[in-house]
Amino acid sequence: MSSPLIVSAYPLSPAFANWDPGVEDEVLHGLAAMPGVTTLEVPWIDGIHPHDSEWFLANVPDVALALTPLPFVMRRLATPGYGIASPDDDGRAAAVADLRRVAEDVATITERSAARVAAVELHTAPRGAADADALARSLAEIAALDWSGARLVIEHCDAHVPGQTPEKGFLSLDGEISAIRSSGADVGLWMNWGRSAIELRDPDAVADQIAAAADSGLLDALVLSGASDREGPYGGPWIDAHHPFASIDPESASLLTDDRVHAAVRAAGEAPSLGLKVSRHPAATTAAEVLRVAERHRQVLAAAAP
């Protein structure tokens, strides 16, 4: 596989929910050592690490990081009007202020750890009320911050669809592309197969949405994450649970078949990076188990990549 590979560490790590520094260390270093892996995605949840930021700074491997504040953003949605795409001035200002804190932590990671932050993901909240003009104003402000060399990207999540219960319900892909262009900010796009499937409710339509992102010239990465239309071991229908590939865990009821992996990769064209964001099975509690799952997914994606 010639494309650099991003692997999301936190849905795989058993230590994300139940803190165990030994397990976390083994997962992070094991993922970073896999062939082709250049970047690990880690969460920003009101701080550098959800359990122990000092431990993380001392122990994170020498690898590029993609920092996602999405788990934090989802908590903040309880604040009315919160989000960088909010037409509410106070809600938009609060979201931009939170990203200033993210930028400060990016600087800390850069200065005090073996890792560097290659990308920071942005998310176009609020749910059901996101506005492209408001997003453009925010992007201009956010891009003016010091990101210590990190690339800013909008991670497209499921957009608000009238009459459909959303998982995120953020801005449409067209709105995100329009806002990036009108802002003049140097911001890219990340697509996530599962989140597009949740929005579109049609797994065979996802490749077309990925192609639209690629055609915009803004697509930086395609991340492969599954979704399901029914109840299963990873949760209920159309939830953002990062289902595995269907071929690797048939019991998951994942809609992300190997054929759809191939179709998505083709649709992404020459996107600079590919990614994996899959959850560990609820019964997988050891680092060795989740690393085997990650490697099996990596092999399927490698077979699909040009």
Image: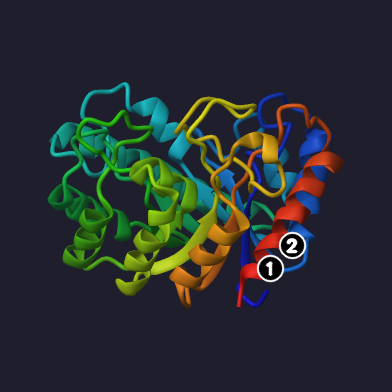
On the rendered image, what quadrant is the C terminus found in? bottom right
Query: Image point 83% across, 44% down: which residue?
Result: 26
SS of the residue under disc 1? helix
Where in the figure is residue 32, as x and y percent of width and height?
74, 57
Q: Which residue carries the number 1 mark?
A: 302
* Vertical order, 197 against 37 (above or below): above
Label 1: few (<14), some (14–19) or many (≥20) C-alpha neighbours in 10 Å:
some
Query: What is the spatial separation of the Cα atoms under label 2 and label 1, in whole angstroms?
Result: 5 Å
- Report the residue at 28% width, 55% height from top: 173
Task: Name the residue at 77% across, 67% down.
Answer: 35
Tag 2–tag 1 contact (CB < 8 Å): yes
Residue lying at 36% horizontally and 62% vertically, measured from the top left: 208
Residue 116, visible in the rendered structure: no
Q: Is residue 87 above or below residue 34?
A: above
Q: Where is mark 2, residue-wise?
A: 299
Q: Is residue 128 above or below residue 200?
A: above
Q: Position of residue 265 (x, y in %)?
A: 52, 67
Task: Please give left or right for residue 247 compared with residue 161 in the image.
Answer: right
Q: Name the amino acid type tagged 1.
A: Ala
* Residue 17 shows in this picture: yes
Q: Quadrant of residue 25?
A: top right
